[in-house]
Amino acid sequence: MRIMQSVRTRSWLRAAAAVAAMLACTLAQAATVQAGTRARADGSLIHWSLTPPLHAAPDARSPRGVLLVAQGSGCHPASASASVAAAHAVAPALALLTVEKYGVSPHDRPADAIADCSQDYRLHHTVSQRAADALQVLQGLRD
């Protein structure tokens, strides 16, 4: 029994150390995150953020580019998503781009990610709108 507890404790400590390392990398890059807005045709704003790679690519043949992450359900902002940070950890040599959903701003903190969403979110959030927003942001960054 004691051996199993020791193994579980070591596994938990390794996982905690990995999470701490990811957070440290993310925090180290926090000062260089680029954030901005783009206007949609209807005048509403698209909020986006671009986080640089967590570390440089090891060699010239390594992938370089942008990882576009679309966070999941609800109206929490991308910055509040643990999944977004985890996705960046999987591809640390890529820059990370997040584009907020229609009706969501980076500073929103709804108590409930479904029940407390804004009216704009409820009226305009669709997959096709998200794709159009991401394309508009990518085109703006490329220009």
Image (tube, grey):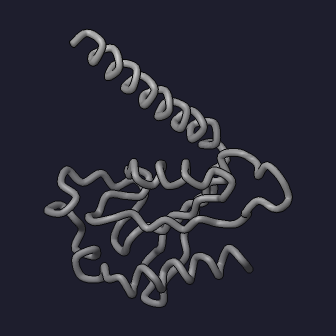
State the image quarter where residue 125 is shown: bottom left
Image x and y of residue 71, in percent: 39, 63
Q: In the picture, residue 110 is in which quadrant?
A: bottom left
| Residue 114, x across and y down, in percent | 18, 63
- Report the residue that reaches farthest toward the bottom: 41
**Residue at the spot x=19%, y=50% of the render?**
111
Q: Residue furthest left?
A: 115
Q: Nearer the viewer, residue 68 or 61?
A: 61
**In the figure, residue 51 lies in which quadrant?**
bottom right
Does 15 appear above or below 92?
above
In the displayed structure, 110 sits above or below 118; it is above
Is residue 108 rendered to the left or right of residue 112?
right
Q: Residue at x 63, y 56 (%)?
A: 34
Residue positioned 74% across, 80% down in the render: 143
List x then y, in percent, for residue 91: 60, 55
Query: What x and y, as percent, mark residue 109?
Result: 30, 51
For this view, does 110 lie left or right of residue 87?
A: left
